[in-house]
Image (spheres, rainbow, N blue to C red):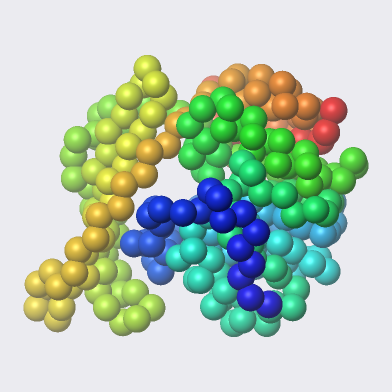
Amino acid sequence: MAVDQRDPRMTSGPDAYAGEAEIHDHLRRRLTQQDVGFFLDVVRDSGGPLLELASGTGRLLLPLAREVASAVGVDNSPAMLRECEQRRAGHGLDEQVELVLGDIRTIRLGRRFRTVVIGGQSLAFMHSDEDLFAALETVRAHLEPDGVLAAAMPVPRFEELAQSQHQLKLVDDFVAEDGRRTVVWNYSFADPVRQLATLRRIIEVLDDDGVVVERRHVVHEMTFRYPGELRRLLQGAGFTLKEVYGGYDRRPFDSSAQHFVWIAVPS
């Protein structure tokens, strides 16, 4: 099943993930250890069909798709979807998983799903309330009346980020799937007033002598909202929070929570 571009209006221009799609899952491996089990439980409880918005390389989509008869992943990065397409074949899910190139604020597939998932920190790329409302309207347009939305966002810790910002930080040093030694650095800074974090990721490929033979820079801007804001925006978009947790292990949400994790239903 080929990648299907249904919403080309919002997918022109540079691909923000072109420089890191191949190593994305490696960089997210710690998160994968935390969140896949949570989302698997949600899908097993609520059933399919399944829609993941901002599905990327299929880090969540592919293991979740094994629990349902059909699944769709939407993402606006051609590079990420190419990675997912290759991995989909390796998982034997070509006929079960459809991939769509499109913007989660505007995509309309013309069908409804029992479960909608938004994983990672994808909603942080919705920089304005209008953007976030548009993404949530997409969820409502595709969710069955008794369906569920499962999603999460990191809880902003700008005071912690301030201690390490404007410093080059070694993230990882590993041998990639293509056999090349890869070193990843982060350089970040934050604007707590705008709740905006800017991450410059520097990806270096080294030869056997440790000489850099390739270097790529990837820049991401992320808007982090506090849990109270997210509650208000979700309710304003017509959702009722059914379950709220402070982590993917379903711990209670309190002031120590690192993540705001929720399951919501249409109001």
User: Measuring 46% from the left and 54% from the top, which residue is drawn there?
Assistant: 12
Q: Hey, which quadrant is residue 8 in on the image?
A: bottom right
Depth check: give the residue in front, 131 or 178: 131
The residue at 78%/47% (across/down) is: 142
Quarter-wise, where is residue 178 in the image? bottom left
Q: Position of residue 34 (x, y in %)?
A: 57, 52
Report x, y in % for residue 65: 72, 66
Side of 185 relative to 210 (left or right):
right
Image location (x, y in percent) of residue 135: 64, 38
Quadrant containing the N terminus is bottom right
Q: Nearer the viewer, residue 252 or 211?
A: 211
The residue lying furthest to the right in this view is 146
Question: So how many labels did they put on this image?
Answer: 0
- Residue 111 lies left or right of residue 151; in this view the side is right
The answer, for residue 75, to whether it is visible in the render is no
Identified at 70% across, 32% down, the residue is 244
In the image, residue 164 sits, relative to residue 21, either above or below, namely above
The location of residue 145, given as percent across then percent down, is 90, 41
- Above or below, comparing residue 182 to residue 115 in the picture: below
